[in-house]
Amino acid sequence: MTTAPNPSPGPADQGGDLEAMRRALALAASVRTRTAPNPWVGSVVIAGDLSFEGATEPPGGRHAEVVALAAAGERARGATLYTTLEPCVHHGLTPPCTGTIVAAGVSRVVVGLFDPDSRVSGRGVAELRSAGIEVIVGVAAEEGTELLAPYLKHRRTGRPWVVLKLAATLDGRIAAPDGTSTWITGEEARADAHRLRAASDAVLVGAGTVRADDPQLTVRTVPEPERQPLRVVLGKAPADARIQPAVEMKGEPSEVLDELGAQGILQVLVEGGARVARAFHHGGVVDRYVVYLAPALFGGDDAVPMFSGAGAATMEDLWRGRLVSVIRLGDDLRVELEAA
């Protein structure tokens, strides 16, 4: 694994560096569902009082820096280029961005994050500096790291970012004793879950959930989704199940993630059921937990819990996390957490 160098110290916010980088981050977020397996990147060119913007196009298209520089044209000469991720320096489906930046004649480049991809990893910044361009790295780095977390993890480990999604009552139950679970949460929470699917490259469930619920696992409430996620079943799905066509897999979570990562999957959304949730949780492979809590109670111990099987035996074994966010969606709560 190649480790990117630490950001070199640069001058504090000059001419609105932070503001411009946050605009670039917003552009990157706007194409979050369109670019995988490439990173979603935003770029802004500031030339005097004028600004020109770009975001990464779908695979095979232009990278964000190239889009912004094309919009700027000759006005890019002597300007400052902001980009949320280190410009690429290798030939892929498109030429290296560094060559385009140098040819455009910009005088200064502000980068959010080094790219951990072994083909870049500091080389892009080094090439720009060797061409005499001033380069600052690390502006809005924390925000950029959060936005690009799935891509960064994939490039560093070869595995996708894992989001475990659960919808439960306040007493921690995900289905009634008869197996029914439609609907625990309200429409706003369900719409948010579809947005989470839209941001994922794959959605994964167990074969038991397919047999019990016959889910489609498609993105339906997001207007005109750019793509549908790959549907993955742990085990064997019935040939006539609505999830078909689906990829059927077997093995431990770590093995499944290695295989999905090799296929270029950057984010996988694990949607259950209780056995699959337990396997990924106890396997220590979950990066984010997204729990939708409804103001409802089963009021007993016979409904289906979030996780099947034995849990922590003592308080010392209790899993503890860190709250990332708590949002109200209609009558429900969306609780996002990660390992402490």
Image: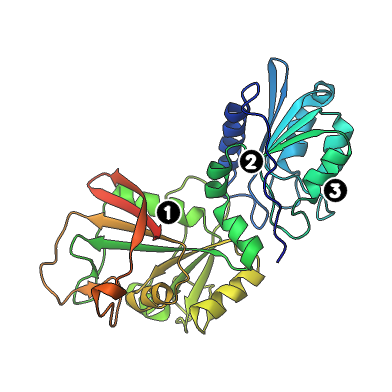
Q: Residue at x 85, y 23 (%)?
A: 74
Secondary structure at numbered mark 1: helix
Above or below: residue 267 compared with residue 40: below
Q: Nearer the viewer, mark 3 or mark 1?
A: 3
Name the spot of residue 22 as percent of width and height, x first: 57, 33
Q: Position of residue 46 (x, y in %)?
A: 71, 23
Give left or right: position of 239 versus 274: right
Q: Quadrant of the N terminus?
A: bottom right
| Kind of residue sitting beneath label 2 | Gly
Horizontal side, residue 126 vs residue 18: left or right: right
| Amino acid type at image mark 3 | Pro
Single out the mark in the foreground, 1 or 2: 2
Residue hosting label 1: 194
Judging depth in this view, the residue of 264 and 114 nearest the camera is 114
Q: Quadrant of residue 263?
A: bottom right
Q: Position of residue 314 (x, y in %)?
A: 24, 77
Neighbourhood count class around disc 2 (C-alpha, 10 Å): few under 14, some 14–19, many 20 upward:
some
Circles 3, 1 touching at the beta carbon (< 8 Å): no
Q: Count all numbered tags in the image, as a single digit.
A: 3
Tag 1: residue type? His
Q: Nearer the viewer, residue 273 or 48?
A: 48
* Residue 220 appears in the figure: no
Nearer the observer, 330 or 262? 262
Structural crowding at the residue carrying mark 1, measured as other residues with C-alpha within 10 Å and reported as few (<14), some (14–19) or many (≥20)? some
Q: Quadrant of residue 283?
A: bottom left
Query: In this figure, which residue is indicated by the disc labeled 2?
Result: 138
Nearest to the eye among marks 2 and 3: give it: 2
Q: Which residue is mark 3?
A: 95
- Label 3's element? loop
Residue 227 in the image: above or below residue 137: below
Up-down relation of residue 54 to residue 247 (above or below):
above
Kindly identify the residue that appears in the image at 46 percent across and 81 percent down: 237
